[in-house]
Image (cartoon, grey):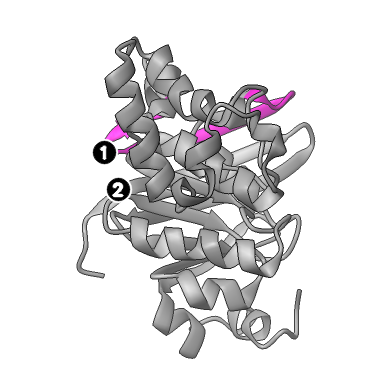
Amino acid sequence: MDTKTHISVRNLNVHYKESHALRNINIDIPDKKITVILGPSGCGKSTLLKCFNRLIDTVEDVKVTGQVLVDGEDLFSPDAEVTHIRKKMGLLSQRPVPLPMSIYDNVAYGPRLHGLRKRAALDAIVEKHLKMASLWDEVEGRLHEPASKLSIGQQQRLCLARGLAVGPEIILGDEPTSALDPKSSRHIEQRFLELKNEYTIVIVTHILRQAKRLADYVVFLYLGELIEHGPAQEMFENPKEEMTREYMKGIIS
């Protein structure tokens, strides 16, 4: 694929106690594309995603070997600065987790944390990123109400706005629509399709229809092993591996 690589994974292995969760993973994630990590439950999709922002560090009894390079920087180097790494990443979890504060303060939280105090600048950031998340028109008149009053679909878009407000390079989504109704899911999918012009997006899903709607590049994992990866059209229409073909046909799940 003739495109720049943003994330490179080299000989990545992850062990949870006695379990070998990821085995010798080697892939290149393209810049400013949507990469979908596909595979059945328990195959290592979320584990791989957690390696990209070092959230794997929060798991007990985990051992990671190999490299994850972002812009050539090895995230697992002893010299790697984790806060700097995570600032490059925006994360959408399976269920939205708005902060226990107002809609405005949720979006302003990251910029304030990085030292921004001027009200006019914060106002502009909040408006810009709520618009990017397609939420501004729905909340413009109630920015100072608690975020908890929003619907779950609105909360997920708020979390997207909050993640974008710190200026990441990469957006990670761990089954980001699994808790949402179809309309809200479409909202999030549409945002991803628009945002890929500015961000590298990596999404974990087990929903094949969603993958087909969104993916430019596909990574297929099965039982912790990388079975196949490549441009979406090739992966969906003419996969090389028998196991991939069976998964795409719904024979294995």
Q: Is residue 134 above or below residue 78?
A: below
75 or 121, nearer to the observer: 121
Query: Could you tell me which quadrant the C terminus lies in?
Result: bottom right
Residue 73: x percent and y percent? 30, 31
Among all residues in the image, which is located at the extreme right? 18
- Disc 2 and disc 1 in contact, CB within 8 angstroms: yes
Binning the other alpha carbons within 10 Å of mark 2 as few (below 14), some (14 to 19) or many (20 upward) gives some
Q: What residue do we see at 70% from left, 45% from top?
A: 95
Q: Which mark is residue 71?
A: 1
- Counting every numbered tag in the picture gives 2
Q: Which contiguous range is marked in magenta?
A: 58-76
**Label 2 to label 1, Cα distance in Å?**
6 Å
Query: Could you tell me which quadrant the N terminus lies in?
Result: bottom left
Q: Would you say 100 lies left or right of 51 here?
A: right
In reply to whether residue 122 is colored magenta, the answer given is: no
Q: Would you say 83 lies left or right of 249 here?
A: left
Binning the other alpha carbons within 10 Å of mark 1 as few (below 14), some (14 to 19) or many (20 upward) gives few
Q: Earlier in the sequence, mark 2 or mark 1?
A: 2
Quadrant in the rendering for residue 98: top right
Q: What residue do we see at 36% from left, 47% from top?
A: 8
121 or 170, nearer to the observer: 121
Looking at the rendered structure, the kind of residue marked 2 is: His
Instruction: Classify mark 2: helix, strand or loop.
Output: strand
Name the residue that disc number 2 marks. 6
50 or 26, nearer to the observer: 50
